[in-house]
Image: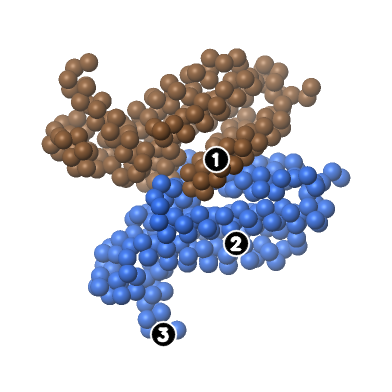
Chain colours: A blue, B brown
Amino acid sequence: MSKGDDTRERILERAFRVASRDGLEGLSIGGLAESLAMSKSGLFAHFGSKEELQVEVLQAAARRFEDSVMRPAFRAPRGTPRIRHFLENWLHWVNSPDGAGCLFVTAAVELDDRDGRPREVVVEEQRKLQDAFARSARVAIDAGHFRKDLDCRQFAFELYALLLGYHNAKRLLREPGAEKALRSAFERLLTDAAAPS
Amino acid sequence: MSKGDDTRERILERAFRVASRDGLEGLSIGGLAESLAMSKSGLFAHFGSKEELQVEVLQAAARRFEDSVMRPAFRAPRGTPRIRHFLENWLHWVNSPDGAGCLFVTAAVELDDRDGRPREVVVEEQRKLQDAFARSARVAIDAGHFRKDLDCRQFAFELYALLLGYHNAKRLLREPGAEKALRSAFERLLTDAAAPS
């Protein structure tokens, strides 16, 4: 890794932490430069604009998500075990001190009305995630775990809704029962999707 | 209404619109004063701080929500019809040009990490809403529509999760099928809750 790449990584790492806490709008080139003891022009040499920085932070978060949540889940046996594995990884991710899961949920709400590249990246990543849910459901049908007439896109919509509901109950309402409620709803979703035994 | 009250209402109305579009953090006393052709000190005479303004905007939004969504739903016959009525009112509210529903969803995400009065108001209002869901489910059990062993708080959690899922699918992903997905999940929730016939 060249020194330039190294600096770039350091900036992204810091930006990721700031954005996880304060949202993408909380990122400022000036603030970042100060906290990294760099000049603003030095930082601009790496990221030409706040928007570019936001895009790169989102892409870096997406790569981490892929590595920590998605890829390990896809190593589990296909069908229901893989979907269960995903939930465990996701819970671990969203509750880790990195708090990185929040970045996408926060960004989704921050950007829903604001057209531009950062919004496109969030939409893209979220579509990828919901596509992965739908594909996993399809695979679970093929494995004989889920019933043949299951609407896989509907399954993906409901699973994603539960993740949002958990995020809200945990982060905003700080409800001690949030995880229990998520798990219980998740079991209901799986039971409803299950192939008749 | 005195002239002072009238000005106050006018400020709140404008602030509500700005916050619905840009979030609570998008509210600035300076920006509001300019768009209302008032002096900043004139505006400060009504709202002593940005935080106070945020609190009042949230409370005004909560009153509207009560009037447009909750109260009319509670005029429907108790049990399942009332819960269905709520969903229709909520969809109407969240898709109205006022876009006011978004203010609470946006505020929830904006404020989840920021302690203070605005956060308390959002938590309070959301608890009230989920309590109303749980109470309506309890009433539906008494009316013989829902099964006796239904976990009413779990029902409330899942219903709220679906509203968040819809909000996300509609506002961020701009999916034409968002409403259909919500309705389909809602029917599944009601079917699962239904008393055995």
Q: Chain of mark 2?
A: A
**Tag nearer the camera, 3 or 2:** 3
Q: Nearer the viewer, residue A85 or A125?
A: A125
Location of residue B59 in the rendering, given as x and y in whole percent from the top left corner = 35, 29
Residue A48 % position (x, y): 32, 69
Q: Residue at x 70, y 56 (%)?
A: A136
- Outermost residue toward the front in this view: B176
Per the image, the residue denoted by label 1 is: B166
Disc 2 residue type (three-letter) = Val
Amino acid at pointer 1: Tyr
Q: Amino acid at mark 3?
A: Ser
* Residue that appears at 70% across and 49% down: A152
Residue A21 at least partly seen = no
Q: The numbered mark 1 sits on a residue in which chain?
A: B
Q: Is residue A104 above or below residue B88?
A: below
**Residue B108 at least partly seen:** yes
Q: Which is more foreground, mark 3 or mark 1?
A: 1
Instruction: For mark 3, give the secondary structure.
Output: loop
Q: Secondary structure at mark 2?
A: helix
As drawn, A138 above or below B92: below
Residue at the image position 38 percent from the left and 83 percent from the top = A3
Work out which residue is located at the far bottom of the displayed protein and give it.
A2
Q: Chain of mark 3?
A: A
Q: x%, y% of residue A77?
A: 76, 62
Q: Residues within 10 Å of mark 1 (few under 14, many from 20)?
A: many
Which part of the image, by quadrant, shows the N terminus of chain B? Answer: top left
Residue B28's spot in the image, x, y percent? 24, 43
The quadrant the C terminus of chain B occupies is top right
Q: Which residue is mark 2?
A: A69
- A189 on left or right of B108: right
